[in-house]
Amino acid sequence: MADSLASPQPKPMSMRARSHRLTAAILAGALSLAPPLAMAWGPQGHAIVADIAQSHLDPAAAAQVAALLGLEGDTRLDQIASWADGNRKQHPGTGPWHYVDIPLDAAGYDAARDCREADCVVAKIGHFTQVLADPRQAPAARLEALKWVVHFVADVHQPLHASDHGDKGGNTVQEVYFGRGTNLHAMWDGRIIEHALGLPLGPNYSFNHVAVGDAAAQLDAAITPAERQAWAPPGLLPGIDRAAAAWADESHALARTVAYGDLPEKPQGRWAYTYQAEAWPVVQQRLQQAGVRLAELLNEALAGR
């Protein structure tokens, strides 16, 4: 697949490309000063989720999304998909909102244990979805809520954002993956995606938006109608707290069985190839599920479907 996603030859920069470059520059400036635990899915993963969702918005929801994005001169969800990561520098108290620390050996999410002050990704998805869905809220507040929802729905689908093994969600598990020093969390944030799709980050967190959009379209096309129905049945909005908890439980189970379960105790030899073969189908499906569920949630919140 990587060959089909090669970067195109340089062309005159369009208005959309200039907007992407400005967004990337703002994000890079914020992230360059952020602590090393700041990233969730990398910018490519968040953009893929946003692109999949964008392509399945109802006309009424798409119109409201366009109106909200237009408040700050944006036109697409992928332009705001990583805003929440950049925002952490200015508002470090929002850091815990991006994940939920479910103990790896626990059966699943327990709000009393894992989100005691409603200060985790599960609770914040529900909170900001309600703000977004409330037409009485100021447009600026609804735009900010949209940014959080787009980001957090993606975050909760990353297995290491719903698990902890006394290692900061895998951040302290150091590895060398395909010859590059990294850690387990960063592998799941972006290294697995980059290796599978040939979508490396450039300087200052920049990436090829055209190639990422093409990758999102390919992943979207691979989703069957039955999968869409199973992953995001109608009625997400009224039960969003339960749904977000279920998504966290899915991620937690995958952390146990794949992220940690398939990791060799002493990685050596060609272990990265074996691990990639096990991990990529999981990452691919989590990106697809996040995109489908985000689209359904936005359609219900903004179009009353």
Image (cartoon, rainbow, N blue to C red):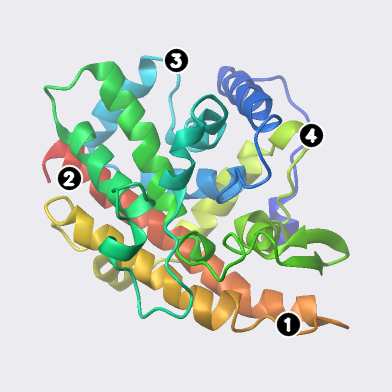
CA gap, disc 2 to disc 3?
A: 24 Å
Q: Quadrant of the N terminus?
A: bottom right
Q: Is residue 109 left or right of residue 278?
A: left
CA gap, disc 2 to disc 4?
A: 38 Å
Binning the other alpha carbons within 10 Å of mark 3 as few (below 14), some (14 to 19) or many (20 upward) gives few
- Amino acid carrying label 1: it is Thr
- Amino acid carrying label 4: it is Pro
Q: Residue at x 46, y 64 (%)?
A: 286
Asked whether disc 4 touches disc 3, contact meaning CB atoms under 8 Å apart, the reply is no
Q: Residue 274: give its label.
A: 1
Say which element carries label 4.
Answer: helix
Would you name the residue on which mark 4 appears? 203
Q: Nearer the viewer, mark 1 or mark 3?
A: 1
Q: Position of residue 145 (x, y in %)?
A: 31, 32
Q: Is residue 56 left or right of residue 192?
A: left
Would you name the residue on which mark 3 appears? 73
- Residue 96 vertical placement versus 141 (above, below): below
Q: Nearer the viewer, mark 2 or mark 4?
A: 4
